[in-house]
Amino acid sequence: MLDVTFLLSAFVILLVTIAPFETAPVFVGLARPLSPDDRRRTVRRAVVISGLVLVAFALVGKGLLGLLHVSLPALRTAGGVLLMSQAADNPWHIAGVLGMLALCLLLAALAMQYVFDGLNEGLLKRLT
């Protein structure tokens, strides 16, 4: 059974990555001169292409990161930095709010790691 936390995390990441609330008005503006059939065809094509790209990266993404010698924590940190930079540009932007939240969570995780490492070192010194 899938973990609810994982599903929620994946949904938020996809929501921020795809940004449907920002791209929909752009699509409406660009597709205005198209006929309804052409609009439907364009939407179908965009969904299929983006779905294929998403599936392709899901299947080969880990191998590609290994080939490029990029660790998953480094990728997550870079993603957090990018979200934070978006948040600095426009704090009311959904990605901006989530970026600030991601930065806070990243800093909290780093602080906890620092504390736990310190506790582990102290315990090791006492045991040896």
Image: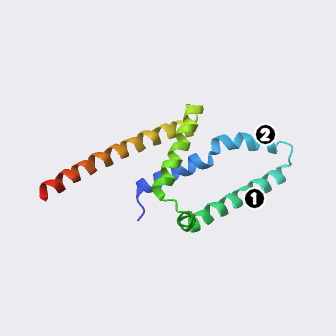
Task: Write down the residue under mark 1.
Answer: 45
Q: Amino acid at mark 1?
A: Arg
* Tag 2: amino acid: Gly
In the rendered image, the vertical position of residue 68 relative to residue 112, given as above or below: below
Q: Position of residue 67 (x, y in %)?
A: 56, 67
Task: Residue 106: give x, y in percent of width and height.
Answer: 42, 44
Give whichever of 84, 92 is nearer the camera. 84
Residue that appears at 55% across and 35% down: 87
Is disc 2 surrounded by few (<14), some (14 to 19) or many (20+) residues within 10 Å?
Answer: few
Q: Which mark is residue 1?
A: none
Q: CA distance from mark 1 to mark 2?
A: 17 Å
Q: How many marks?
A: 2
Point out residue 101 in the picture as x, y percentages from the top left corner. Answer: 46, 39
Label 2: element kind:
helix
User: Is 18 displayed left or right of 7 in the figure?
Assistant: right
Q: Quadrant of the C terminus?
A: bottom left
Residue 90 image position (x, y, % from top left): 59, 31
Residue 40, by quadrant, is bottom right
Q: Is residue 84 above or below residue 118?
A: above
Examine the image and state in which quarter residue 110 appears: top left
* First in sequence: mark 1 vs mark 2: 2
According to the picture, the residue beneath numbered tag 2 turns out to be 29
> Of helix, strand and loop, which one carries label 1?
helix
> How has the structure been colored for display?
rainbow
Image quadrant containing the N terminus: bottom left
Q: Residues within 10 Å of mark 1 (few under 14, many from 20)?
A: few
Q: Residue at x 46, y 51 (%)?
A: 8
**Position of 104 relative to 39 (above/below):** above
Residue at 52% in and 39% down: 84
Which residue is more in the foreground, 24 or 86?
86
